[in-house]
Structures are given as C-alpha cells and as structure tokens.
Image: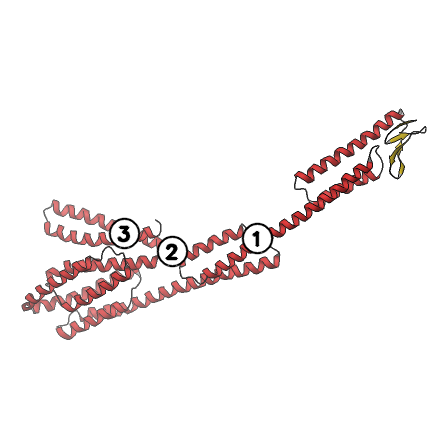
Amino acid sequence: MSSDPWGRVDETGTVYVRTADGEQVVGSWQAGSPEEALAYFERKYEGLVVEIGLLEKRVQTTDLSAKDAQIAIDHLREQVDAHHAVGDLAALRARLDKLVENVDKRREERRAQRARQSDEARKAKEALVAEAEDLARSDQWRVAGERLRALVDTWKGLPRLDRKSDDELWHRFSHARSAFSKRRKAHFAQLDAQREEARRTKERLVAEAEELSGSTDWGPTAARYRELMADWKAAGRAQREHEDDLWNRFRGAQDIFFAARSSVFAERDAEQAENLKLKEELAQEAEKLLPVTDLKAARAAFRSINERWESIGHVPRDARPKVEGRMHTVERAIQEAEEAEWRRTNPEARARAEGLTGQLQAAVDKLRTQIEQARAQGNTSRADKLERELEGRQALLDQALKGLQEFGG
C-alpha cells in the first residue's frame, strides 16, 4: 500500500483521492507499482491545473465570449467532479467558481458597454437625422447636397441599433434626403421653365423688331422700340445658348431702323454729338462699376445709368458701336456676375462654365491673332476695331474664369 497527502493505493491496486467529503475512488491500477499509480493520477491533476490556468488567462486577456467560457468551465468541472485525478480537487473547484464570477462580471461589463455604445450610436444617428431634416429645408442647393452626402457616409460608419429603432431613424433620414432632392429638382425645373418662357417672349419681340426695322414712321416706331426694349428687360434671361443670338437679332433690327432715321435727320448731327458726349460720360461712369464686387449695388447703379442712357437719345452712327460696346461690356459683366451667382446654386453648370471659358479663350486668342495680322498689313482701322472687340471678349473671359474659381476649379 502506498499514499501521499492527497491520495493512496490499497493492496488491490485501487487508487483513492482524499476530499472534504471523504475518500473517493479514482480508479484501479494493475500495470505497475503503487507509486507509479499515484504519479499517474497526480499528473492528470497537474493537467487539470494547467488547463484551468490557461482558461483563466484566456478569460482575462482575450475577448472569449461568456458562452464559450462557461462551456469550458463546465467541461473542466465535470473532469474535477469525476475524481479521476489525485490532488487538491477542492482548490480546483474554488478556482472554477472564481472563474464563473469573473465571467459573469465580464458579461455584465460587456452588456453595459454594448448599452453605452448603442446609446451613443442612437444619439449620433438622431443628430444626423435632425441635421438632415434641417438641410431638407435649405435653399443652398450645392452646399446642402454635399453635406447630405457626407452625412450618409457618417451614417454608414455607425453601428446598427435594434431593428425597430434603426429602421425608424433611417426612414426619417431617407425621407429628409428625398424631400431635399424633390425641392431641388422642382427649383431647377422652375428656372428652366422661366428661361423657356423668356425665350418664347423674346422670339416674339425679335419678330416684331425685325418687322419694324423697315418703317419710316420715325416717331411712333422709335417709341415702340423703346417699349419693346422695356419688354425685353422685363422678360428675364433665356437659356444661355439662345440669349446672345436673340439679343443680336433684336439689337440688329433696331440698328437698321435707327440708322435709316439718322440718315434722314442729318440736321440733328449736332444734337447727336452732344448725346455722344453724354453717353461717353455715362459709359465711363458705368465702367467704374467693374470689376463687380457688390452685385446688388452694381445692378442698381447700372439700371440708373441705363435709364439715363435711354433718355439721352441717339448718337452719330459711326460712334455708336464703340460707346454702346463699352456699355454692353459692363452690362455683360454684370450679367455674367448674375450667371455666376446662379451657377453657385447649380452644380450641373460647371461643365457649361468650362465650355464657355474655352470658347471665350479661343475667341480672345483668335482676335489677338487677327489684330497682329491687321497691324502687320498696316490696316490700323481694322486693328483698332478688333482691339475694341477684344476688350469686350476679354471682360467676358475674365468673368467666366472668375465663375470657374467659384466652383473651386
């Protein structure tokens, strides 16, 4: 018979382990000496000690789930309770009990952490929904649209809530985005409709202006042209691709009429010379509005100048293109500033702005080449005329480039 503090082997080879409840049979050993039998079952005990130690470390240092940890604990407890090892089994049970306490504690900590994370995610998503609903009422189409896209990316990075809460918040968020898109679409559709209406109105004005261009009923016809001009300004701007062509036809028809009237009233040359002086002063006053820094003030000032301009009357025919060209340059610059203001609310206009800039740059380059050729040929008159045209084109190009900068390009 052989024994140690935790177990013994009797004369039949039966191995016992000592516990607080008395001796428990561990097993039977017939393959060797009693000492070898005790050593064998002590090694099984040491194996349980190692396994419990490893599990303690996993629970402490890894993200082992509470469920998996409990399964491992139950498995080890079954081995300890089976009494197939010689050693301090009560100590192993105590360590397993402590492990259960630690697992329960970690389970509660994780539950609390998940609750905190869920609460934080809920607050974050509620904040996104509130901002999206505010943006849905915005008229800053480009800025608000970009911000809504950024909010979507932020939303995707947040954890999901419970299905009901997450679906409700997403529905509000999605509804806000849809409402903004619907309002933006309606806004630009309205702008397009207004420009189309302006185009149809100006087509009618051009047709009447061209019909009147051959009239010799100087007074009434001139008065009618002034009314047509007022109607033209009241009509608003047509689509960009139509506006310049319609204006050129409209102005061209007036030029034909007023040129004919000027030839008949040659005696008014002195009066027209004085008109020219006044209009040159107004053109100079108008040119001081450039570059446009305060659109509202510039528009009001130009309107005042233009009203005085229209009240002055005609100037000598040969001087008209230059002085009117100066005014048209200023008017066009203000119109371009208005277009830039409109483009800032219309992200889709960038491509058109780039195309216009390219066209204007090509026109400026072509004019410069023509000027060089004219001067090389000694055609000073043509070169001077082209120089004046270049000034107008350059002003338009400058405005177009400024508009592109507003797009960040």
**Which x, y percent locates residue 9?**
90, 29
- Circle 1 residue: 120
> Residue lying farthest right?
11
Is 69 placed left or right of 34 in the picture? left
Q: Earlier in the sequence, mark 3 or mark 1?
A: 1
Residue 359's tag is 3
Kind of residue sitting beneath label 1: Glu
- Location of residue 244 by image quarter: bottom left
Mark 3 vs mark 1: in front: 1
Foreground residue among 336 and 351: 336
Q: Earlier in the sequence, mark 3 or mark 2?
A: 2
Asked if labels 2 and 3 touch by Cβ distance under 8 angstroms, the answer is: no
**Which x, y percent locates residue 394?**
22, 51
Residue 107 vs 31, above or below: the answer is below
Q: Residue at x 10, y 60 (%)?
A: 318
The N terminus is located in which quarter?
top right
Foreground residue among 300 and 407: 300
Is 41 placed left or right of 122 in the picture? right
